[in-house]
Image (cartoon, rainbow, N blue to C red):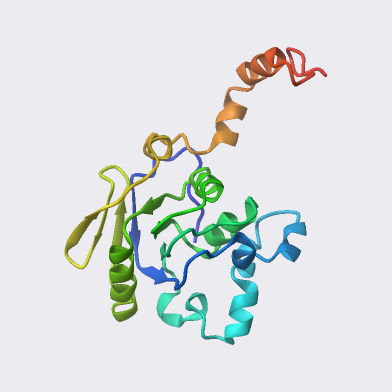
Amino acid sequence: MSLPERGSAVRRVAGTAVPLPGDDVDTDQIVPARFLKAVTFDEMGEYVFYDERAAADGDHPFDDPAYQGARILVVGDNFGCGSSREHAPQALLRWGVRGIVGVSFAEIFADNCSSLGVPTVTTDRETVDDLRGFVRSNPDAGIEIDVVDERVVYDGREVPVGIDDSARAALVDGQWDTTTMMRANLDAARETAAELPYTDTKPGGEP
């Protein structure tokens, strides 16, 4: 599955979903720390929930054939807590996740997802539990995250969801890839850096 095109608008994410049980899933569960030494993120999708999948011996949702190819992840409360490692959203992205619905997210995790073009939207516990149950019973059913209108559509229903205003604007306007934006405006970035009291960068990028 190809990665989101840099600079593209992310107005909606549609596809099948994978439900993940539990709350307080931390980034070390998503990607164990020993995999952080990887030089690139290219193979990170292989390591997602590595230890939990090994312990489940094939009985983990990410190994369930019914959920292969899913683009939307449905999670509980405080998902992505723990360390701020970017590897966690990178692993989910490279496994195939393009949007996440949950009760709540750790702030840095949600920010890291947004910077990869992956919207994280929130709704109440009852809706998340209902959605997870629906996906378990209907793994082939299509789910839609509508970033523009802040809603999730499934089973003939439209459910309002929340998303951080700045993240929503960046996704909808195609300005979520801050690295590419900085490179495109490198001269302005260097001028700004030169004016900051805590850097020693001079105009033109010279130290």
Tell which residue pokes out farthest to the left in this image. 156
**In x, y percent, where is residue 121?**
37, 52
- The residue drawn where x is 28% and y is 46% is 150
Res 140 seen here: no
**In x, y percent, where is residue 170?**
43, 35
Position of residue 170 in the picture relative to residue 185 (left or right): left
- The residue drawn where x is 36% and y is 53% is 122
Quarter of the image where one finds residue 80: bottom right
Res 150 seen here: yes
**In x, y percent, where is residue 15?**
34, 63
- The residue drawn where x is 30% and y is 68% is 131
The C terminus lies in which quarter of the figure?
top right
Position of residue 13 in the picture relative to residue 38 (left or right): left
**In x, y percent, where is residue 29?**
61, 67
- The residue drawn where x is 50% and y is 56% is 2
Q: Which residue is more in the foreground, 25 or 200?
A: 25
Q: Which residue is more in the foreground, 96 or 72?
A: 72
Rendered position, 191 above or below 31: above
Tell which residue pokes out farthest to the right in this image. 207
